[in-house]
Image (tube, rainbow, N blue to C red):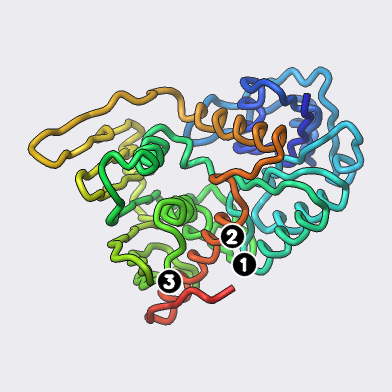
């Protein structure tokens, strides 16, 4: 039985904690938080935009530490689940590797490409696995597309457009601080940057235009360029200042012989969706049956992939740190393109 220690008990730490309870082969052996109430199991103040509200948790048998180095010193813990602020990801990951632990780090991997590279280097030096928590590909609508691509049933991919927009998250401290959270690109759009990288490979460049808030991209539209393919790929992402539509994500993905479309928006607290729909090569339109569960189910699938990788020693195509680093690189390029109002090429490694 693998033993995991969760560092950071906020909304994401709680969602991970609940997901572990539904996955065989792994157990939450410890938690780490500076909050005395949360250490005692009082998680009622935790809130998020999906999933159950925080409540009193029975933490019998769970070691509880107020300091991160105490968690790292626990000899029973095999893997550290990092749900700390993004500004702490690199430092905490490297410390975990030095302590001989595997690391499952919530997205974004880090706030800079240089930090990402240091994390990857530390993983190799310690001979431990580094898995990055990009959960979007485990949501049914996004998992369906990955399976469709792999099957080749509609021929090759030829392009797609992606959308991810929220209302201004005024409850998140330092949301627009590039040294703390990173703003909408690294906190929000990084989901689609990662997914685009999975589907199409690494773009050769970006052309982004948008608006800034205190020097950080608030909203932008991007065209992704590819050197070896005639893909037509674009994305819109960021923040609007009208709270009536708190969240929306969507895609339209083009194959040689079909188009797949999906969208979901939360408007005045209620979901408004166009279900996953396939437009075939003639007039046929299909709405496939896919799982319609709680969004938290995607995190259970993600944790199952973590367990598979740690048990077999095999890398993950989805939670791969190289792909996660490329997603951070794309966000950096988009920010630069918006600020300078020029196309930005992907640097050679």
Distance from label 3 to label 2 (Cα)? 15 Å
Q: Earlier in the sequence, mark 3 or mark 2?
A: 3
The numbered disc on residue 325 is: 2
In x, y percent, where is residue 208?
A: 37, 71
Label 1–label 2 contact, CB within 8 A: yes
Picture disc at residue 144 = none
Tag 1 residue: 113
Image height of 211 relative to 253, above or below: below
- For disc 2, the neighbor class at 10 Å (few under 14, some 14 to 19, many from 20) is many
Give the mark count: 3
In the rendering, at what x and y percent does residue 142 appear? 39, 39
Identify residue for label 3.
Answer: 204
Residue 197 located left or right of residue 107: left
Q: Nearer the viewer, residue 279 or 269?
A: 279
Element marked by disc 3: loop
**Residue for point 54% across, 61% down:** 326
Mark 3 vs mark 1: give the one in front.
3
State how far apart marks 3 and 1 are (Cα): 16 Å
The quarter in which the N terminus is drawn is top right
Q: Upstream in the sequence, badge 3 or badge 1? A: 1
Classify 10 Å Cα crowding around label 3: few (below 14), some (14-19), many (20 and above). some
Instruction: Compare marks 1 and 2 and give the one earlier in the sequence.
Output: 1
Number of the front mark, 3 or 2: 3
């Amino acid at each position: 039985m693998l033993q995991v220690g969760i560092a950071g008990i906020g909304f994401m730490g709680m969602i991970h904690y609940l997901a572990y309870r539904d996955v065989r082969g792994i157990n939450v052996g410890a938690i780490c938080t500076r909050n005395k109430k949360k250490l005692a199991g009082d998680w009622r103040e935790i809130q998020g935009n999906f999933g159950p509200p925080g409540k009193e948790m029975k933490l019998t048998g769970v070691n509880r530490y107020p300091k991160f180095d105490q968690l790292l010193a626990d000899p029973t813990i095999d893997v550290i689940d990092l749900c700390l602020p993004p500004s702490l990801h690199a430092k905490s990951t490297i410390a975990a590797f030095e302590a001989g632990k595997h690391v499952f780090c919530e997205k974004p991997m880090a706030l800079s490409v240089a930090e990402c590279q240091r994390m990857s280097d530390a993983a190799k030096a310690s001979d431990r696995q580094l898995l990055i928590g990009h959960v979007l590909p485990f949501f049914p609508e996004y998992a369906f597309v990955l399976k469709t691509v792999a099957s080749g049933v509609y021929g090759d991919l030829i392009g797609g457009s992606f959308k991810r927009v929220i209302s201004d998250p005024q409850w998140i401290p330092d949301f627009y601080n590039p040294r703390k959270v990173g703003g909408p690109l690294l906190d929000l759009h990084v989901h689609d940057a990662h997914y685009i990288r999975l589907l199409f490979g690494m773009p050769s460049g970006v052309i982004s235009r948008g608006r800034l808030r205190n020097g950080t991209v608030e909203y932008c539209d991007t065209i992704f360029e590819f050197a070896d393919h005639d893909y037509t790929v674009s994305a819109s992402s960021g923040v609007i200042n009208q709270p009536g539509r708190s969240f929306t994500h969507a895609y339209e993905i083009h194959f040689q012989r079909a188009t797949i479309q999906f969208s979901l928006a939360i408007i005045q607290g209620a979901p408004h969706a166009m279900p996953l729909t396939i437009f075939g090569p003639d007039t046929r339109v299909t709405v496939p049956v896919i799982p319609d569960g709680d969004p938290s189910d995607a995190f259970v699938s993600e944790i199952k992939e973590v367990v598979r990788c740690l048990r077999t020693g095999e890398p993950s195509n989805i939670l791969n740190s190289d792909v996660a680093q490329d997603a951070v690189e794309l966000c950096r390029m988009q920010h630069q393109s918006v600020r300078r109002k020029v196309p930005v090429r992907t640097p050679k490694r």
